[in-house]
Amino acid sequence: MRTRTLLLVAVAVAVAVVSFVVAMPAVTASAATPEPIRVGTMAPLSGLFAQPGKDIIDGFRLYFEQTGFQAAGRRIELTEEDDEGNNATAMTKYRKLVERDRIHVFGGVVLVNIGYALAPMFDKDRIPALFVTSPDDLTKRRRARWMIRAAMSASQPMHAMGEYAYKVLGYRKVAAVSLDNGFGHESVGGFQRVFEELGGKMVQKLWAPLNAVDFAPYITQLQRDVDAVVAVNAGAGSVRFFKQYAEYGLKGKIPLIGTGVTSEDTVLRSLADEAEGFVGALHYASTLQNPANQAFVKAVVAKSGRTPGYFQAAGYSGARWIVEAARRIDGKVEDRERFLQAIRQAANGEDLRGQILIDEYGNPTQNIYILKVEKVGGKLQNTVIHTYPMVSQFWTYKPDEFLKTPAYSRDYPPVKP
């Protein structure tokens, strides 16, 4: 009996020792190698707006590469998705990122319709999101608490453009040709409001479909007695618009002005001199002479042989904010509320575009640069010709008073006879 008891004790001890030894590597590995910080990105990687979408994700990837895909002792895992510019596709990809990939933070989005569709979902799931898309009301009347803007609201630079067009360029009567979507409506609306309050007049607004491949029907309708045409477009659409505007003999006769997105670097690469002379307003240009931007441009040129555009810069900034935020909270990104606040704090201060201050609505207050497309060294570039420092998304209006007015839309402000 004693022998049997000792044998049972020995077996029990052996089992315990084996169990402990087997368990040890898992515990040690878990402590030494925490789960990665999972970043999900989504943008149109196919279709008309594929280039802006690819630029955003390239910007995220470049910054993460520079950090060795590491932050606060944790590996960064980047998942890229193509929303195809389609709401249904975007919603399906979003659910995959959240439920299967279990992302901690999100970055991306180009199109307004997708921004409005996804924002409430991030609020519901309490996942920090950095949007590049620019619909005004995401940081105004339909504020998304868990979304921080990595770029600008659509009307933000165009308020400044309205003032510059009237006070500096001396224009008094203008027409507009714009994308027929939220970005276009809000861009034109912001310009028109400021321009008309100063004494100017918007006499015509022509709206081109998002998938327009021929701008002739709109260009031929333009009134020829205006001082300038306000152009709002992006990506491949901008390239076609500039080319057709020149083909119809209007380049050099009626000046083109508008949002700087219309003439950002990826657009200029596809043009000869068709965009030369265009004056736009934007918060970023590859020609900005500050150390952070010069280092960024140098890195992009070394990797791709081309200067970065607005969308790539936005992705790069967003990635930097994520890494800095993770460091501020010692990598504890599972604490979502704290992570969100850390991202807001990380965004404040010096950026590629200059100083930034995230307002209480989640939008950057930042410099707006007036840019002129010039040919330098045989290549087109956006040259800074004026700076409006630290421009709010509300321009010079008081936020509470601004929010009482109608949202900029296809019909507001109206074209008055």
Image (tube, rainbow, N blue to C red):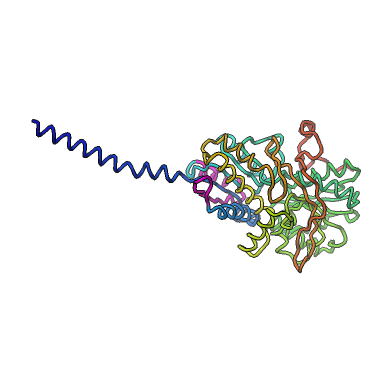
Quadrant in which the N terminus is drawn: top left
Q: Would you say residue 76 sits in the magenta stretch?
A: yes
Start and end of the magenta stretch? Answer: 69-98
Q: Quadrant of the C terminus?
A: top right
Residue, far left = 1
**Front residue of this view, candidates 172 and 2:** 2
Q: Is 223 left or right of 260, judged from the image as shown?
A: right
Report the number of discs.
0
Residue 88 rendering spot, x and y as whole percentages: 58, 45
Residue 214 x/y as whole percent: 73, 59
Q: Name the one closer to the observer, 91 or 255.
A: 255
- Can the viewer see residue 59 in this picture? yes
The reply, left or right, for residue 123 in relation to residue 5 is right
The quarter of the displayed image where residue 304 is located = bottom right
In which quarter of the view is residue 297 placed? bottom right
Q: Is residue 211 visible?
A: no
Residue 261 picture location, percent across and down: 73, 53
- Most foreground residue, 145 or 94: 145
Residue furthest bottom as drawn: 378
Q: Residue at 64%, 60% (x, y): give it.
A: 300
| Picture layout, residue 399 above or below residue 29 | above
In the image, is residue 322 part of the stretch drawn in magenta? no
Counting from the top left corner in percent of width and height, residue 310 is at 69, 53
Q: Is residue 406 above or below residue 160?
A: above
